[in-house]
Image (cartoon, grey):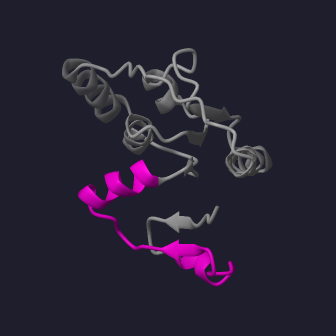
């Protein structure tokens, strides 16, 4: 099984510190190509330490791609860990645990263990709820 790490930005800080044999820096990925990439990915590793919305996690889940992400507040309000086995929430900023979980998923793929895909239930806020939260953020900071 050939595996590659695809980084969907310019990766300026990483380019000089990693071997590029199996790492591809794509630059900005178009919306169309993003879904193709997510659909063909074995694991989506969300490295953000802060997200205001985190929609790409939902997009990965809808594509059937397992996600490893930090346990950020924005994910808890949208993705219910009880309803999906396809997302691993890692304690915030525990980088070693995050890396270990990704490695474990890749090792399981190499061993031929099937990933347990489930239907993902998204608890998305309504437009009115989103508008109210945005208004509160602007008003009260």
Q: How many marks?
A: 0
Instruction: Confirm whether the magenta stretch covers residue 23.
Output: yes
The residue at the point 47 percent across, 24 percent down is: 79
Counting from the top left corner in percent of width and height, residue 48 is at: 55, 50
Horizontal relation, residue 2 to residue 11: left or right: right
The residue at the point 38 percent across, 18 percent down is: 123
Counting from the top left corner in percent of width and height, residue 7 is at: 51, 66
* Looking at the image, residue 24 lies above or below residue 139: below
The residue at the point 64 percent across, 61 percent down is: 1
Counting from the top left corner in percent of width and height, residue 108 is at: 72, 44
Counting from the top left corner in percent of width and height, residue 16 is at: 64, 84
Q: In the image shown, does 7 or 117 lie closer to the viewer?
A: 117
* Looking at the image, residue 92 lies above or below residue 73: below
Instruction: Confirm whether the magenta stretch covers residue 124.
Output: no
Q: Kindly give the residue lying farthest to the top in the view shown.
A: 82
Horizontal relation, residue 126 to residue 90: left or right: left
Q: In the image shown, does 115 or 87 lie closer to the viewer?
A: 115
Q: In the image shown, does 19 or 115 lie closer to the viewer?
A: 115
* Looking at the image, residue 27 lies above or below residue 77: below
Report the span colored magenta.
Answer: 12-40
Specify the quadrant that holds the C terminus. top left
Horizontal relation, residue 90 to residue 67: left or right: right
């Amino acid at each position: 099984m050939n595996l590659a790490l695809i980084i969907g930005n310019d990766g300026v800080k990483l380019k000089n510190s990693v071997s590029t044999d199996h790492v591809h820096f794509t630059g900005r990925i178009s919306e169309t190509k993003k879904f193709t990439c997510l659909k063909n990915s074995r694991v989506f590793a969300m490295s953000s330490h802060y997200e205001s919305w985190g929609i790409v996690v939902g997009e990965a889940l809808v594509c059937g791609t397992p996600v490893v992400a930090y346990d950020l507040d924005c994910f808890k309000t949208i993705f219910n860990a009880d309803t999906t086995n396809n997302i691993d929430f890692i304690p915030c900023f525990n980088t070693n645990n995050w890396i270990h979980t990704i490695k474990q998923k890749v090792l399981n793929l190499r061993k031929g263990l099937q990933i347990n895909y489930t239907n993902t239930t998204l608890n998305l806020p309504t437009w009115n709820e989103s508008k109210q939260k945005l208004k509160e953020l602007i008003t009260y900071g």
